Amino acid sequence: MPLQRFRPISGRCKLCQGEVELSIKHSESLPKECPKCGQEIEHCPNLSAPVAKVLKTPSPSDAKAAGFQVYKRLGKGEYEKQ
Ligand SMILES: [Zn+2]
């Protein structure tokens, strides 16, 4: 079971040092609260990913793979769903 990293949305936590690792079962939804301190938490991206990859502008196919809606720019203020 891989550990998933979470961090409090406030960015600060005395109990978990601003980061907590939780093992998430596949069927479970992501936790909304830190089990240690009860703060709202968000899922951290994989910190082991190369920095260059994070800074790279995502291509439409990358965005689609990540589950984002992709819009093609048609002109000033116009977008078409691809
Ligand atoms: Zn915490």
Image: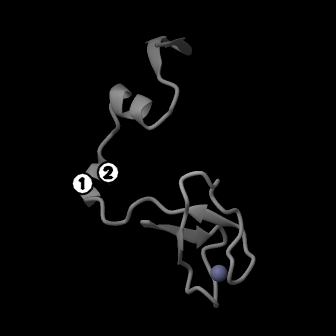
Q: Which mark is residue 69?
A: none
Residue kind at label 2, given as amino acid type? Leu
Tags 2 and 1 in contact by the CB under 8 Å rule?
yes
The percent position of residue 2, horizontal first and vertical second, equals: 42, 66
In front: 20, or 63? Answer: 20
Image: 58 above or below 8: above
Q: Quadrant of residue 62?
A: top left
Residue kind at label 1, given as amino acid type? Ala
Image: 62 above or below 74: below
The percent position of residue 70, horizontal first and vertical second, equals: 47, 23
Q: Quadrant of ligand 1?
A: bottom right
The percent position of residue 26, horizontal first and vertical second, equals: 54, 53
Q: Residue at x 37, y 65 (%)?
A: 47
Residue 48 relative to residue 31: left or right: left
Q: Residue at x 31, y 65 (%)?
A: 48
Disc 1 residue lies near ligand 1 with CB under 8 A: no
Disc 2 residue lies near ligand 1 with CB under 8 A: no
Q: Residue at x 64, y 90 (%)?
A: 14
Name the residue beneath numbered marker 1: 52
The percent position of residue 42, horizontal first and vertical second, equals: 61, 62
In front: 80, or 30? Answer: 30
The residues tagged by marks 2 and 1 sit, at their Cα atoms, a distance apart of: 5 Å
Name the residue beneath numbered marker 2: 55
Image: 76 above or below 56: above
The quarter of the image holding the N terminus is bottom left
